[in-house]
Amino acid sequence: MSHPKFFDAIEIIKVKDPLSNALGAFDNGEYEFSYLDVVKSSGHSCPTVAGAYLITLEALKALYPNERAIRGNIKVAFEEAEKDGVAGVIANVVSQITGATQITGFKGLQGKFARHSLMSFEQPINASARFTRVDSGKCVDVIYNPSSILPHPDMQLIMQKMQKNEASADELKEFGVLWQDRVKRIFENQESVLRVQEL
Protein backbone atom coordinates (compact mmCIF):
# COMPACT_ATOMS: atom_id res chain seq x y z
CA MET A 1 0.00 0.00 0.00
CA SER A 2 1.56 3.24 -1.15
CA HIS A 3 0.76 6.62 0.41
CA PRO A 4 2.45 10.01 0.93
CA LYS A 5 5.34 9.62 3.34
CA PHE A 6 4.30 12.58 5.48
CA PHE A 7 1.32 10.55 6.73
CA ASP A 8 3.77 8.49 8.80
CA ALA A 9 5.30 11.56 10.46
CA ILE A 10 2.02 12.85 11.93
CA GLU A 11 1.56 12.44 15.68
CA ILE A 12 -0.46 9.37 16.67
CA ILE A 13 -3.52 9.62 18.94
CA LYS A 14 -3.38 7.16 21.84
CA VAL A 15 -6.58 6.11 23.58
CA LYS A 16 -7.76 3.79 26.31
CA ASP A 17 -11.11 2.14 25.70
CA PRO A 18 -12.88 0.47 28.65
CA LEU A 19 -15.29 -1.32 26.29
CA SER A 20 -12.43 -2.73 24.26
CA ASN A 21 -10.79 -3.92 27.46
CA ALA A 22 -13.99 -5.53 28.76
CA LEU A 23 -14.51 -7.40 25.52
CA GLY A 24 -10.90 -8.49 25.19
CA ALA A 25 -10.08 -6.70 21.95
CA PHE A 26 -6.89 -4.96 23.16
CA ASP A 27 -4.78 -5.45 26.30
CA ASN A 28 -5.88 -2.86 28.88
CA GLY A 29 -8.08 -1.39 26.15
CA GLU A 30 -5.11 0.57 24.82
CA TYR A 31 -4.64 1.30 21.13
CA GLU A 32 -3.80 4.07 18.69
CA PHE A 33 -5.22 5.97 15.74
CA SER A 34 -2.91 7.33 13.07
CA TYR A 35 -3.67 9.83 10.34
CA LEU A 36 -3.33 6.93 7.90
CA ASP A 37 -6.10 5.12 9.81
CA VAL A 38 -8.57 7.97 9.32
CA VAL A 39 -7.52 8.45 5.69
CA LYS A 40 -8.32 4.80 5.01
CA SER A 41 -11.67 5.15 6.77
CA SER A 42 -12.50 8.39 4.96
CA GLY A 43 -11.20 7.17 1.62
CA HIS A 44 -9.18 10.33 1.04
CA SER A 45 -6.85 12.92 2.56
CA CYS A 46 -7.86 16.57 2.32
CA PRO A 47 -7.78 19.77 4.41
CA THR A 48 -11.08 18.77 6.04
CA VAL A 49 -9.94 15.28 7.07
CA ALA A 50 -6.62 16.75 8.22
CA GLY A 51 -8.46 19.37 10.24
CA ALA A 52 -10.74 16.79 11.84
CA TYR A 53 -7.71 14.76 12.89
CA LEU A 54 -5.90 17.84 14.21
CA ILE A 55 -8.81 19.20 16.24
CA THR A 56 -9.31 15.79 17.83
CA LEU A 57 -5.61 15.31 18.52
CA GLU A 58 -5.20 18.69 20.19
CA ALA A 59 -8.51 18.61 22.06
CA LEU A 60 -7.69 15.23 23.60
CA LYS A 61 -4.21 16.40 24.57
CA ALA A 62 -5.77 19.37 26.36
CA LEU A 63 -8.42 17.25 28.08
CA TYR A 64 -6.04 14.44 29.03
CA PRO A 65 -2.58 15.95 29.53
CA ASN A 66 0.13 13.31 29.94
CA GLU A 67 -2.32 10.40 29.73
CA ARG A 68 -4.34 8.48 27.19
CA ALA A 69 -7.76 9.85 26.35
CA ILE A 70 -10.62 7.64 27.49
CA ARG A 71 -12.62 6.64 24.44
CA GLY A 72 -16.35 6.78 25.16
CA ASN A 73 -15.88 9.45 27.86
CA ILE A 74 -15.95 12.43 25.51
CA LYS A 75 -18.87 14.53 24.30
CA VAL A 76 -18.45 16.49 21.08
CA ALA A 77 -20.59 19.43 19.98
CA PHE A 78 -20.68 21.24 16.64
CA GLU A 79 -22.11 24.65 15.81
CA GLU A 80 -23.26 23.56 12.35
CA ALA A 81 -25.97 21.12 11.40
CA GLU A 82 -24.55 17.76 10.39
CA LYS A 83 -25.72 18.24 6.79
CA ASP A 84 -24.10 21.69 6.47
CA GLY A 85 -20.75 22.27 4.86
CA VAL A 86 -18.16 19.70 5.91
CA ALA A 87 -19.55 19.15 9.42
CA GLY A 88 -20.54 15.58 8.63
CA VAL A 89 -17.10 14.70 7.27
CA ILE A 90 -15.42 16.13 10.36
CA ALA A 91 -17.89 14.39 12.65
CA ASN A 92 -17.17 11.00 11.06
CA VAL A 93 -13.45 11.33 11.81
CA VAL A 94 -14.07 12.62 15.34
CA SER A 95 -16.50 9.78 15.99
CA GLN A 96 -14.02 7.18 14.78
CA ILE A 97 -11.40 8.39 17.26
CA THR A 98 -13.48 9.36 20.30
CA GLY A 99 -16.34 6.87 19.97
CA ALA A 100 -18.85 9.70 20.32
CA THR A 101 -22.01 9.23 18.23
CA GLN A 102 -25.57 10.42 18.04
CA ILE A 103 -28.49 8.07 18.67
CA THR A 104 -27.10 5.40 16.33
CA GLY A 105 -24.16 4.55 18.58
CA PHE A 106 -23.56 1.59 20.87
CA LYS A 107 -26.21 1.35 23.62
CA GLY A 108 -23.90 -0.19 26.22
CA LEU A 109 -23.67 -3.34 28.32
CA GLN A 110 -25.64 -3.47 31.56
CA GLY A 111 -25.63 0.29 31.85
CA LYS A 112 -21.96 0.77 30.97
CA PHE A 113 -19.91 1.68 27.88
CA ALA A 114 -22.69 3.53 26.01
CA ARG A 115 -21.48 5.60 23.07
CA HIS A 116 -24.75 7.03 21.81
CA SER A 117 -25.91 10.61 22.43
CA LEU A 118 -22.35 11.87 22.93
CA MET A 119 -22.32 13.92 19.73
CA SER A 120 -24.58 16.86 18.96
CA PHE A 121 -25.03 19.49 16.25
CA GLU A 122 -26.49 23.01 15.99
CA GLN A 123 -25.14 23.90 19.41
CA PRO A 124 -24.64 27.48 20.72
CA ILE A 125 -20.86 27.52 20.44
CA ASN A 126 -18.43 29.69 18.48
CA ALA A 127 -15.86 27.10 17.46
CA SER A 128 -15.21 24.29 15.02
CA ALA A 129 -16.03 21.86 17.83
CA ARG A 130 -16.31 21.62 21.60
CA PHE A 131 -14.93 18.55 23.38
CA THR A 132 -16.10 17.78 26.92
CA ARG A 133 -15.04 15.06 29.35
CA VAL A 134 -18.11 13.24 30.65
CA ASP A 135 -16.50 12.40 33.99
CA SER A 136 -15.15 15.83 34.98
CA GLY A 137 -17.00 18.29 32.75
CA LYS A 138 -13.71 19.81 31.60
CA CYS A 139 -14.12 21.17 28.09
CA VAL A 140 -12.21 22.87 25.30
CA ASP A 141 -13.18 24.70 22.15
CA VAL A 142 -11.11 24.05 19.05
CA ILE A 143 -11.03 26.43 16.09
CA TYR A 144 -9.63 25.26 12.76
CA ASN A 145 -9.12 27.52 9.75
CA PRO A 146 -6.73 26.41 6.98
CA SER A 147 -7.39 29.40 4.70
CA SER A 148 -3.89 30.79 5.27
CA ILE A 149 -2.39 27.69 3.65
CA LEU A 150 -3.04 28.39 0.01
CA PRO A 151 -3.26 25.71 -2.67
CA HIS A 152 -0.65 25.65 -5.43
CA PRO A 153 -1.82 27.90 -8.31
CA ASP A 154 -1.44 25.07 -10.84
CA MET A 155 -4.22 23.14 -9.08
CA GLN A 156 -6.92 25.44 -10.42
CA LEU A 157 -5.69 25.08 -13.97
CA ILE A 158 -5.63 21.30 -13.77
CA MET A 159 -9.03 21.21 -12.07
CA GLN A 160 -10.53 23.17 -14.94
CA LYS A 161 -9.17 20.56 -17.34
CA MET A 162 -10.48 17.78 -15.12
CA GLN A 163 -13.98 19.23 -15.25
CA LYS A 164 -13.83 19.12 -19.04
CA ASN A 165 -12.25 15.64 -19.10
CA GLU A 166 -9.23 17.18 -20.81
CA ALA A 167 -6.56 16.52 -18.18
CA SER A 168 -3.75 14.17 -19.17
CA ALA A 169 -2.64 11.27 -17.01
CA ASP A 170 0.44 13.25 -15.96
CA GLU A 171 -1.70 16.24 -15.02
CA LEU A 172 -4.04 14.06 -12.96
CA LYS A 173 -1.06 12.63 -11.10
CA GLU A 174 0.36 16.11 -10.57
CA PHE A 175 -2.97 17.30 -9.19
CA GLY A 176 -2.88 14.60 -6.51
CA VAL A 177 0.69 15.49 -5.60
CA LEU A 178 -0.16 19.19 -5.28
CA TRP A 179 -3.33 18.39 -3.31
CA GLN A 180 -1.39 16.37 -0.76
CA ASP A 181 1.31 19.04 -0.63
CA ARG A 182 -1.27 21.45 0.75
CA VAL A 183 -2.40 18.90 3.34
CA LYS A 184 1.25 18.41 4.33
CA ARG A 185 1.73 22.16 4.73
CA ILE A 186 -1.36 22.34 6.95
CA PHE A 187 0.21 19.84 9.34
CA GLU A 188 3.55 21.67 9.16
CA ASN A 189 1.87 24.98 10.03
CA GLN A 190 -0.48 23.72 12.71
CA GLU A 191 0.08 26.76 14.94
CA SER A 192 -1.38 29.06 12.27
CA VAL A 193 -4.46 26.98 11.44
CA LEU A 194 -5.54 25.67 14.84
CA ARG A 195 -6.38 27.21 18.19
CA VAL A 196 -7.43 25.42 21.39
CA GLN A 197 -9.25 27.35 24.09
CA GLU A 198 -9.84 25.83 27.50
CA LEU A 199 -13.17 26.87 29.04
Image (spheres, rainbow, N blue to C red):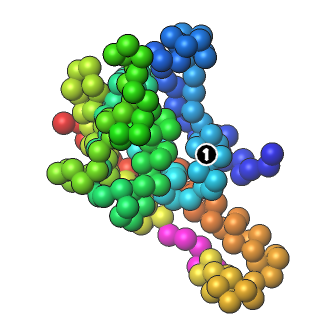
Left or right: 196 in relation to 149: left
Give the residue drawn at x 23%, y 28%.
138
Quarter-of-image position of residue 131: top left
Q: From what the image shows, is residue 166 above or below residue 93?
A: below
- Three-letter amino acid code of the residue under disc 1: Ser
Give the residue drawn at x 61%, y 45%.
41
Find residue 175 and report its horizontal and vertical position in percent: 69, 72
Along the line of sight, which residue is nearer the eye, 29 or 194?
Answer: 29
Circle 1 sits on which residue? 41
Q: From what the image shows, is residue 187 above or below residue 56?
A: below
Is residue 168 at all visible to an observer of this figure?
yes
Quarter-of-image position of residue 160: bottom right
Is residue 56 at all visible to an observer of this figure?
no
Task: Check if residue 151 falls in the magenta segment.
Answer: yes
Find residue 148 and report its horizontal and vertical position in percent: 42, 65
Find residue 58 and report its horizontal and vertical position in percent: 40, 38
Quadrant assignment for the C terminus = top left
Give the residue drawn at x 30%, y 58%.
81
Left or right: 198 in relation to 56: left
- SS under mark 1: helix
Quarter-of-image position of residue 107: top left
Q: Main secondary structure of the magenta part?
A: loop
Q: Which residues are magenta?
A: 150-154
Give the residue drawn at x 57%, y 27%.
32
